[in-house]
Structures are given as C-alpha cells and as structure tokens.
Image (cartoon, rainbow, N blue to C red):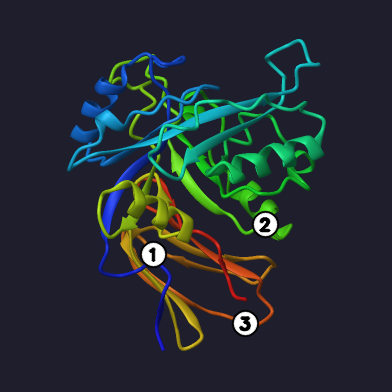
Amino acid sequence: MRKDLLPAGLRAYKANLHCHSTFSDGHLTVEQLKQGYQQAGYSIIAFSDHDHFYPHNALTDANFLALNAFEADISENSEPSGHIRRCYHLCCFAKTDGEDYKEILPTPDYQDKDAINAYIRELNARGFLVQYNHPNWSLQQAEDLRNIHGLWGMEIFNFSATIDGIDGNQGFMYDVLLRDGNRLFCTATDDNHNHYPFGHEQCDSFGGFTVILAERLDYPSVIDALERGNFYASEGPQIHALYVEDGKIHVSCSPARHIRFTTDGRSAKSINAVGNAFVNGGSFELQNEYAYVRVQITGPDGTMAHSNAYWLS
C-alpha cells in the first residue's frame, strides 16, 4: 500500500518563513515586501521582526497570506564582543491570526538550559510553533543544542547567512538534533533584511523558501500543513512526489545531479547523474532498524532541496 509523505492533491504555496521589515532592522516595509515577494511567485510570508509581535492580518487577501510571528533573541550577554557572541534565535509562529499574543516573554539567560526549555514550553502553551534558526550564524555547536526541547522545526538553510559569507546549509546540525531523538521539521528561509534592493547580487531575498502543501490559502489550512509537516525546504529544486511503497521510499523531482537518502546511521544511498545527464527520481529500501529517513536533492546549479525527516516508528 502506498503512503504519501507529501500529500497528493493539495495546492503548493511558496513561503518565506523568516523575514524582517522596517518594524525592526529590515529596510523595506511590509507592504513593499508583500509586493516584491508576490512578484517573485510567493504566496506566504511570516513577518518575524525582532522581539516584538506585530500582527499583519490586513495584508492577507485571496492571493497572499501573512503569518504573524516574531524572532526571539537569547544571546550570550556575558560575552562583550558581538563578533563571537553565541545566541539562540527562535522564530515563533502564531497558530491563529488572533492578535492576543502581543505580550512578549522576557528571554532567559543563555547558559540556563532549564530556563530556555521553560521559555519554549510557555511559547508552545501560548500557541506558537517554535523554529530554531541559523546554527552556524549563531556560532553554536552540538552541545549548545543538546537537551533543548519543544522545537517544532529548524532552518536547514538560511539565505541571508549565505549572502554574508557564512555557510547557511545546516544539514549536519539537523541530523545532530534528529539523532538525539528530536522529532522536528526543517525549513529553508531568506532571513532577509534587504540592505540591497531586489535584483542586486547581494540582495538577501528569494534564495531559500518552503513549499507548503495545503488545501487552501488561509491561516488555519497553512498552520495545519505546518503542524503536519506537509512541506519541504528548497533553494530551487522541486520535489514532485515522496511516498513509501513496497518497503521503499520513493521520490520524484525536478532534474537533479544528486539524490541522497540519509538515515540516523551509516545506511544511506546516493543516486548520481552521469556526464551531462540528470536524474529525476529514485528509491531506497527501508529497514526496521532505521529511526528516520530524509531526502536531499541537488539541482544542476548546486542548489538543494530537503525533505523533512520521516520517522519509521
């Protein structure tokens, strides 16, 4: 029997789930961002300005959805130099479009993991999905993330960090969290501040996006899709289908140079194009000993797409 991991028959909506505007340190208004992103084929933006919750429901219409969010900063304030100061940055997405989230909780001390976990629990209780952002930009190592719980997801790719010269690809850290038993999803985002205009080579928009599969473009449907994991992360490549059948996981995708299947152990598989050809899909046999499996696709230009991790249990 076939089990679709990315549900068939739903609409695909392109989303940027990490965005900064003039409400904090971004250079464009939310109206300018909506216009620019719509012209680039996006239907959803989570406006996640720093440390304040600003609802933007007035921007939502039949062709565009504004997700209400904010980005919390838990920094290592004992370190005086911002150059090497570690931090947890958390995008917090309101699960409803109500405007009763305006009170922002005081952030805990960076070194106090119990307090950080309590902070995340309280965010969850107040109706937020909590996403962990850009581990490399945050200068964090695996030990910083061990025993942090309650996260909904993490950024597996952050375009702004990449534009700044920092490796925005976080596949290794995603596997660290997964191998510690954390069942969380992955997104690709811009984290845009728009210091440079659209079209400029240093513009930090339109480089990382999340494709959300939902019944319709409204707040409940999109949040439901996010909670269920009905999405994938990408810099460009598309995942057309992902399903389990006859003991194997199967994927079909846009033309790719590589397709990789990753598990919690050394069991893995790479499907590689030969010469100037491309591959458009493949399969990987699943074993009961695997805890999870995820798929990574590398397109002709080196950009990647990532599925969420799927737990075999």
User: Which amino acid lies under the numbered mark 2 shown in the image of this protein?
Assistant: Asn
Of tags 3 and 2, the one toward the viewer is 2
Which of the pair 207/2 is nearer the observer? 2
Residue 274, which numbered label?
A: 1
Label 1, secondary structure: give it: loop
Quadrant in which the C terminus appears: bottom right
**Which of the numbered marks, if any, corresponds to residue 42?**
none
Viewport quadrant of the N terminus: bottom left
Q: Residues within 10 Å of mark 3 (few under 14, many from 20)?
A: few
Label ID, residue 182? 2
Q: How many numbered discs, if any?
A: 3
Q: Give coordinates of residue 281: x percent, y percent.
A: 36, 70
Looking at the image, which residue is at 73% across and 43% down?
145
What amino acid type should be assigned to the residue bearing mark 3?
A: Gln
Look at 60% across and 45% down and name the residue there. Answer: 124
- Residue at 52% x, 50% y is 186
Say which label, 1 or 2, has the lower sequence index.
2
- For label 3, the residue is 287
SS at circle 3: loop
Q: Is residue 312 above or below residue 239?
A: below
Residue 300 visible to an observer of this rendering? no
Mark 1: amino acid: Val
The alpha-carbon separation of the residues under discs 1 and 2 comes to 36 Å
Q: Give coordinates of residue 47: x percent, y percent.
A: 40, 30
